[in-house]
């Protein structure tokens, strides 16, 4: 899941996981929702195709990942949404973290 098969597996499609609560090692609480301490990064690396990003996110969701880190500037929102829809995982079970750009 960490490398783009379209580019020979040598370029990361998820450069790092995003730590939401490094100091405590626990997820942050909003009062209603417990956020996971880490999220699967969806920033497309150089040479990564849209289809490879879709497959990576779909694979992550099927493997049990329930937090996705994205942003408008990552140019991956469409692929993340499609993978989330196609995964069959209930939308309410997945935390999608985004940022304003």
Image (cartoon, rainbow, N blue to C red):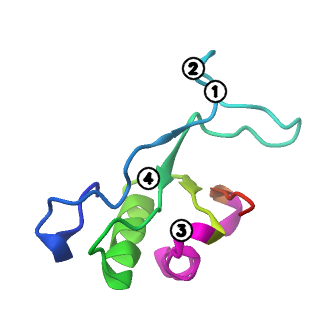
Q: Which mark is residue 74?
A: 3
What is the distance, in whole Å, between disc 3 and disc 2 at their CAs? 26 Å
At a point 84% along the width and 37% down the height, the residue shown is 30
Q: Are circles 3 and 1 on residues that touch, CB within 8 Å? A: no
> x, y (%) of residue 91?
67, 67
> x, y (%) of residue 43?
46, 62
Of circles 1 and 4, the one toward us is 1
**Of the pair 11 and 54, the residue shown nearer to us:** 11
Q: Is residue 77 left or right of residue 42?
A: right
What is the distance, in whole Å, between disc 2 and disc 1 at their CAs? 6 Å
Q: Which mark is residue 64?
A: 4
What is the distance, in whole Å, between disc 2 and disc 4 at their CAs? 19 Å
Is 46 covered by the magenta stretch? no
> x, y (%) of residue 89?
55, 67
Disc 2 secondary structure class:
loop
Q: Which residue is mark 2?
A: 25
Q: Which residue is mark 1?
A: 21
Q: Earlier in the sequence, mark 3 or mark 2?
A: 2
Disc 1 secondary structure class:
loop
Disc 3 secondary structure class:
helix
Q: Quadrant of the N terminus?
A: bottom left
At a point 37% along the width and 50% down the height, the residue shown is 15
């Amino acid at each position: 899941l960490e490398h783009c098969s379209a580019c020979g597996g040598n370029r990361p499609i998820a450069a790092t996981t995003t730590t939401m609560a490094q100091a405590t090692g626990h997820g942050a609480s909003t009062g209603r929702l417990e956020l996971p301490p880490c999220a699967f990064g969806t920033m497309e690396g150089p040479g990564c195709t849209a289809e490879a990003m879709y497959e990576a996110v779909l694979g992550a969701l099927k493997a049990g990942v329930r937090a996705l880190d994205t942003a408008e500037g990552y140019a991956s929102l469409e692929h993340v949404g499609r993978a989330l829809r196609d995964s069959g995982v209930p939308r309410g079970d997945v935390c999608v973290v985004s940022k304003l750009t």
